[in-house]
Amino acid sequence: MKQPQYMRMALIISMAGLMAAGCGSKAEANSDEAEKVEPAIPVEAHAIVRGDIANYFAGPMTLETETDAMVVAKASGIVEKIYVEEGQRVKAGQKLAQLEDAQETHQLAQAKALLRQYESDFKRNKELFGKNLISAEIYERSQYAYEGQNAAWKLARMKKGYTTLRAPFAGVVAERSIKVGNMVALNDPTFRIIDYAALKATLYVPEIELDKLQVGQPATVKLDALPGRDFKGEVRLIAPVVDPASGTVKVTVAIDNSAGALKPGMFGRIEIMHEIHRNVLLLPKEAVLAEDKETNVFVVADTLALRRKVTLGLINSVSYEIIDGLQQGEQVITTGQSGLRDSTRIFVVEN
C-alpha cells in the first residue's frame, strides 16, 4: 500500500533534521578540541658552539707614566733662550733651554789654555827624563801639574755644559716652569718630561686572589674616555708584602702606548687573565635560568621547549663554559624562555 505523498515529505524532513543535529554536535566537539591546543610561543635560540673562555681579575685603575722626570737646573743663571714648548716631543739629550754662560765660557777657555801649557811642559820633561837630563822629581812634578789641570779643564767643561738644559730621555714636554729672562737658581725645576710610550696601571688585589696572579700574565685595559676600545698590557710587578691595613697586594701592569692614544691620569678598569680553557662548549649567558639552586636551560626539540639541567664552569661577559648537560650543535632558547614550561610548544624566530 503506497504512503501518501505528504507522509513521505514529512519523513525526509525529519531525517534531514536529525542529520543536521548530528553534524552540529560533531562540529561543536571539534571546536572544543581546537580550543584546548596551546598556541606555539615565539622564541629566539642559539646553537651551542666551541671556543675559548678565560677567567679574569678586574678592578679600577688610573694610568700613570712609567718614566717621568723633572729637569732641575744644575747651574744658576738667567734664561737666555727656550728651545721647546709644552706638548712637544723631544729626543734624549735634546736642548730644552740655555742659561747665561759667559762666566763658564771664560773659565773653560782659561782652563784649556793652562792645560795646553802643562801638557807641553809634561811632554818636554818626559823626553828629558828619558835622556837622564832632569831629575825624577821635576818630571813627576810636571806630570802631577798636567793631570791636575786636565781634571780642572774637565770640571770647567762640565760646568759649561750645565748651562744648557737637556732632555734626560725621549718623551714629551709636560710642563715648562721657566721663561726667558727668569733668574734660575741651582736645583730649581725647569721642565717636566714624560715618556708616554710606556704607561703603567696600579691596582690593589685582595690577598685571597693573590695565588691566581703571576708576572707576565696578559691584561686588558678599558678606559672611560675611550669606550669600545681595548688596550693590551701585562703584569710587570707583584708586591712581595700584603698591606695589613687593607689586606691587599699592589700589582703593577705595564701598558703598551706605542700608538699614543693613552694619557696619564685616564681612569678605567683593568682585567688580568689568570685562567683559560680552550676549545670548550660555550653557552650564551642569557639562556641560563637559575632556579632552586639548580641551573637550567630550555633546549629546542622540534616544536617543543624541553627543560634541561646543566653544569657550568668558567664565565665571561657573554658566555658560560658547559661542563655537562649539552652537546655541540644543540639549540638553547635565549629569548622568551622565562614564561615557558617543560614541553611547551614553540616556534623559533630567526634572529
Image (cartoon, rainbow, N blue to C red):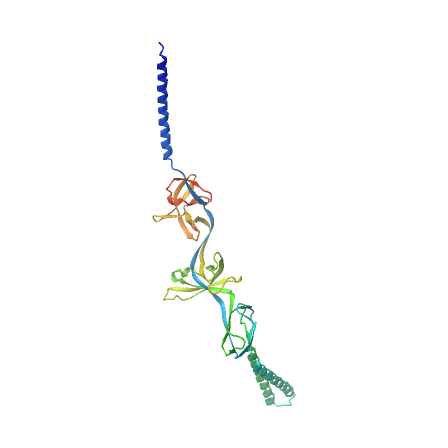
Res 236 seen here: no
The image position of residue 315, as x and y in percent, is: 42, 53
Q: Which of 165 and 22 is in front in this view?
A: 22
Res 290 seen here: yes
Q: In this view, does 1 lie above or below 160?
A: above
Q: Nearer the viewer, residue 283 or 134?
A: 283
- Please identify the quadrant where the N terminus is shown: top left
Quarter of the image for residue 309 reads top left
Residue at x 59%, y 89% (from the top left corner): 137
Residue 294 left/right relative to 226: left
Quarter of the image for residue 62 reads bottom left
Q: In this view, does 97 lie above or below 276?
A: below
Q: Nearer the viewer, residue 281 or 202?
A: 202
The image position of residue 254, as x and y in percent, is: 48, 63
* Number of dots carrying numbers: 0
Q: Residue furthest front?
A: 6
The image position of residue 242, as x and y in percent, is: 39, 65
The image position of residue 100, as x and y in percent, is: 56, 79
Q: Which residue lies furthest to the left in this view?
A: 292
Q: Which residue lies furthest to the top in this view?
A: 1
